[in-house]
Image: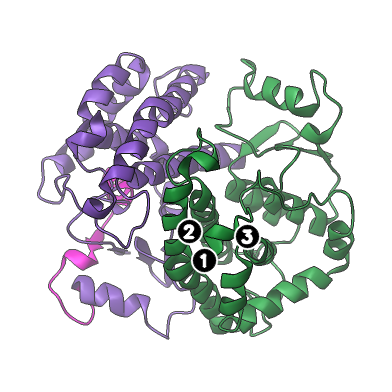
Chain colours: A green, B purple
Amino acid sequence: MRYELYYWPSIQGRGEFIRLALEEAGADYVDVARGRESRRSGVAGMMALMESSRIRQLPFAPPFLRAGKLIIAQTANILMYLGGRHALAPAGEPGRLWAHQLQLTIADLVQEVHDTHHPISSDLYYEDQRKEARQRGETFRKSRMPKYLGYFERVVSANAAGKGYLIGARLTYPDLSLFQIVEGLRYAFPRAMQRQEKKIPRIVALRDRVAERPRIAAYLASKRRIAFNEDGIFRRYPELDG
Amino acid sequence: MRYELYYWPSIQGRGEFIRLALEEAGADYVDVARGRESRRSGVAGMMALMESSRIRQLPFAPPFLRAGKLIIAQTANILMYLGGRHALAPAGEPGRLWAHQLQLTIADLVQEVHDTHHPISSDLYYEDQRKEARQRGETFRKSRMPKYLGYFERVVSANAAGKGYLIGARLTYPDLSLFQIVEGLRYAFPRAMQRQEKKIPRIVALRDRVAERPRIAAYLASKRRIAFNEDGIFRRYPELDG
């Protein structure tokens, strides 16, 4: 089965967490909105599907994944589905719940990163909420970012299997997402992140371990990996980096 | 098995979505932090558990649920677990993913409600971010709230079983959460909500259907139901209601 991923074509955004899982799984997938514009492809194809009256289980927003007859939305939900199918999640229910719990905490962090540049409204440009963004950025750097990263450092440290992953003795989908968090924070908050990294050696080592995996390394070097830019979740606005 | 719910004792907050599911299920549970303060009860007991080095699968924040040996955090994750155990979710995987997708979209809405009164920082008081809250509140009322409510109205409308629920022909856990959303928005944004309700008759009817269920009605009339107040997610600040 070929998966169809639907997400904005010019940003990593939330879709990137799914791309990383599909790539690590070696799954057959097409990134629909990055294809030629048509009724069934490109952004037009994505919007047509979202607004189709034939779809009963409507997504609220991209990303969403078509897997045969299923259409699944919400990043963490898609990852839970893929994790179970591609050996990227623990096998039993307690482990699956734990993996999902970590992923939902990552999703909360992603939302807070987004709100550093859009504290007032997603309908307005960054330039129209710059002053408020500076305040929110400061809170994020000084309070929230250390709290989240410190939490994940503790989780890796407390993992009884002790192999440097979040869960057990091998890679699971939240590890891939935590890799993306490190990459994104390095891009968006290089100064703050440089200071932080001294306090989170296990997360930095986990990030390196993920980057070296053959399929991930090949993906990162390919044109399929969109570069970070100032339309995505992680944006480099120096004034937000203190 | 008696469940242990851990959440702040003086607010509905995110814990309320779980309380509603436990009540509808007729489950045996104790609301730990509302008990007498001790090493294992009250807020002290909750904090002690969160910081315990004996817990390997740490919650990032309340709410969390202890179910036998399991400790599960993240509201939507807890509801997925309870939904499967108490017939509050569809039986098959496609239905379970769909229920969870709706719940995660409700979680996004809850976060946006929270940010109307805390657009800059959760570490600051509302009074210290009042001007920004007014701007964010306006965006929420005019753009986000209608978008979310319109989405859920479409979902109820598109439900092929046509019984006025979000999913299929009977109640599932996202229906309970949507009830709580309506109650919360009526409390926090009474004027905006009054205007909105004309456009979402199916959601209003669903809210009424949930309120009439015997166990929910009994819960709402009991002392276990904490009143809305200005420490929770849904706060009545008239200036945010336009």
Q: Residue at x 28, y 47 (%)?
A: B233
Q: Nearer the viewer, residue B3 or A143?
A: A143
Q: Which one is closest to the eye, mark 3 or mark 1?
A: 1
Q: CA distance from mark 2 to mark 1?
A: 8 Å
| Horizontal relation, residue B62 to residue A112: left or right | left
Q: Residue at x 70, y 37 (%)?
A: A8
Indicate the amino acid at tag 3: Ala
- Mark before the other along the chain sequence, 2 or 3: 2
- Give the labeled residue for mark 1: A242
Indicate the amino acid at tag 2: Gly
Give the image location of residue B105, x and y in percent: 48, 39
Image mark 3: chain: A
- Give the labeled residue for mark 2: A137
Give the image location of residue B97, x and y in percent: 57, 42
Is residue B22 inside the magenta stretch? yes
Magenta span covers which residues? B17-41
